Image (cartoon, rainbow, N blue to C red):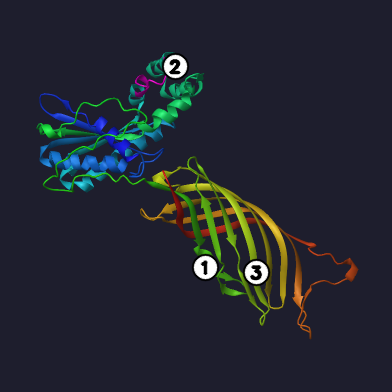
Amino acid sequence: MILSAILVFLTFLTPIIDSAERVISAPIHFRWDGSEHDRDYFGNGAATDSLVNALYSIGPENITDISITGYSSPDGSREHNMKLSRRRAAEVGRIIAGSIPELSGKIHTRGAGEAWGLLRERVEGDMSLSVPTCDRILNILDDKGISDDTRKWRLAHRLGHSPENGDVYRHLLKKHYRYLRCAIVEIHVSVPEKESEVQPEPAEPSETPASPAPQAHSAPSEGPAAFVPDLRPARIPVLGISTNLLYDCTYVPGYGLTSIPSFSLEYYPRAGFFTFGADVEWPMWQHWDRHDFFQINNITLWGRRYFRPKFGGFFQGAYSFASVNVFRYGIGYDDKGWQGEGAGVSAGIGYRHMIGRSRFFFDTGIALGTLWSKYDPYVWGDDATHWYYYDYSGKPEDFKERSKRFLWLGPTRVYFSIGYDLIRRKK
């Protein structure tokens, strides 16, 4: 991935020479609906380090202007995409200014919104598209008599299938749209660079480019050392584990301050919006001398739908979820208690936040739903046997276990958890 990013970077690092200055351009890419710089995505770490090293090599005094233009892919609303493109440009400007403060006054950012022009260039150069299919796409892109909303609708509904590419719109989404979510940096240089620093004319990048030969860079007199790419494979999480901090210090009326042992597991698929997990809680506290018992075994299975999949390199940010759970319990206070079994369904919202670039994260949320239980009340007999008896009056032959019912509608879960991504896989 890093080598591919370097090739893409070098491809766009193309000098365009006129009589007054040289212009060098390079892209930084973003995740879907994201405007935060993610070094783990699309080789951005290598591309950003190469860009900063190039700026140091040129020398801030030789740079007249840095123009950063943000773009978005044309899925979603036009207004949202314009705001997104502005945020992407501002993010790259912040990174450059933070790395080389002397350039702060020379950085200018703007949002260009949906990258229709970039999309047209990529479609026109896509050799995997048949000529009739390419022509159909270009006819829609070049139609000046329709609005952009109509253009989006026609791309999604009028292209159909082709023998070579299958669902043509899906082909565009997978092969081209991710390249449009970017900010392009243009460096305006007032003097020619040394011959050794001029990049060769590139070839059109392919979807799976071959690994390029390492580029030689002379170390600048100031600033960071020349970039040496880290060829170790990047890793993404597979399984996370967390514990609910609110359960670790819980006050139960009639029982007092206690702790509820709990843990949660979350499985992250390779792609998509959804994750799956399970929660387990098992407080088993008992005080026979006070006749106080707090014993619950609860298992919950749930699924989450993240609104920004793989945002920042991981599943994180806001999400909605739904769950089902089964439980059994024995709860008693001061000679009286209840024991039974039940089940429930819930739905809720939450937010997951990574702690820096570590594997640790915070996870918080709330759920509403219903719990249904069948149970029996019991009492302590206070006799020579010291046994507990069902709280029942009537003929023994008429007694039936779990004859009582309980239904709850309302909040079913509140959590603020700290977790750790336990297992990771290669990208």
Q: Is residue 184 visible?
A: no
Label 2 to label 1, Cα distance in Å?
60 Å
Q: Secondary structure at mark 3?
A: strand
Residue 143, relative to residue 241: is it above or below? above
Q: Earlier in the sequence, mark 3 or mark 1?
A: 1
Residue occupying the point 52% across, 52% down: 266
Q: Residue furthest bottom?
A: 384
Q: Does 123 lie within the magenta span?
A: yes
Instruction: From the top left corner, tell me how far across and down residue 346 is, in percent.
Output: 62, 51
Q: Earlier in the sequence, mark 2 or mark 1?
A: 2
Q: Secondary structure at mark 1?
A: helix
Q: Amino acid at mark 1?
A: Asp
Quadrant hosting residue 378 = bottom right
Circle 3 residue? 295
Which stretch is magenta?
Answer: 122-130
Quadrant hosting residue 333 = bottom right
Q: Local crowd at mark 3 within 10 Å, few (<14), some, or many (≥20)?
A: some
Label 3 to label 1, Cα distance in Å?
15 Å
Q: Which mark is residue 146?
A: none
Label 3 to label 2, Cα distance in Å?
65 Å
Task: State yes or no: discs 2 and 1 in contact (Cβ < 8 Å).
Answer: no
Pick whichever, 354 or 49, lies toward us.
Answer: 49
Circle 2 residue? 133
